[in-house]
Amino acid sequence: MTAAGANGRGARRIAVAIHDVEPATFERCALIRDWLGDHGIDRATLLVIPAPDLHPFFQRRPDLAAWLLDCRDRGDAVAQHGFQHRRAGAVGRRRRDEAEFTGLDAEATRASIVAGRRMLSLAGVEPRGFVAPAYAYTPALRRELSADFDWWATLLRLVGRERASLAPALSLRRSPLAVRAGAFAAGGLLRLDLHPADFDRPRRVRALESVLRGAAQRTAVTYDDLC
């Protein structure tokens, strides 16, 4: 089924997002993407951190930029995932990704968004969408995203220019039982959030395999498709 057909009324769809795509996680993310393909997921959304450690991702790993373009050409969507995925002023190398935009005024928020988008554009990727690290949004961030992107995603919904479609995302950071139950109860759209670290936990992987088997008749779509 084409993406257009998958968006028809009554269609049962699955939207998988791989979070935290950056040089440090590239090999793991590539393996996850191949693994998803083996399980029938032919379209996914890749959430890319533009400047981890304040260095453009494509300078650290040109092969990551090339891989993203290949994935896009095969039907995946590439979205912007914050700017550096940590709170400004974090001490040392400690990750503080839970609230990257907290405390930033409107000007600083916009500068961060524009800089990240420019880095993705320089790598040949033009993102239509945005996902804040840990889904932590501020009023200033919401205003900027509504003006500049076709969509942005929260934990509970996907917000587009013309409509907001409700569909909570299931994270493997919840208990495996909760993930299976949430997938079983999902309606027309099943959203799955995957993080590279999830695949260090065999129980989480088994829960995901169970969910994917149960979703075998759903059509895979990207967040770009949904908007």
Image (cartoon, grey):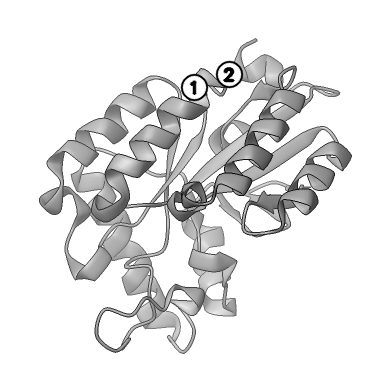
- Which one is nearer the viewer's eye here, 102 or 205? 205
Amino acid carrying mark 1 in the image: Gly
Mark 2, secondary structure of its residue: loop
Say which quarter of the image contains residue 227. Answer: top right
Circle 2 residue:
40
Q: Residues within 10 Å of mark 2 (few under 14, many from 20)?
A: some
- Between 125 and 71, the residue placed more toward the observer is 71
Q: Residue sitting at 73 percent across and 47 percent down?
A: 163
Left or right: residue 104 versus residue 141 is left
Question: Which quadrant of the view contains residue 146?
Answer: bottom right
SS state under label 1: helix
| x 49%, y 22%: residue | 37
Quarter assignment of residue 53:
bottom left
- Of the 4 image quadrants, the one containing the N terminus is top right
Q: Position of residue 94 (x, y in %)?
A: 33, 80
- Near mark 1 (Cα within 10 A), the count class, few <14, some 14-19 or many ≥20, is few
The answer to whether mark 1 and mark 2 are in CB contact below 8 A is yes
Closer to us: 133 or 139: 133
Q: Give the residue at mark 1.
A: 37
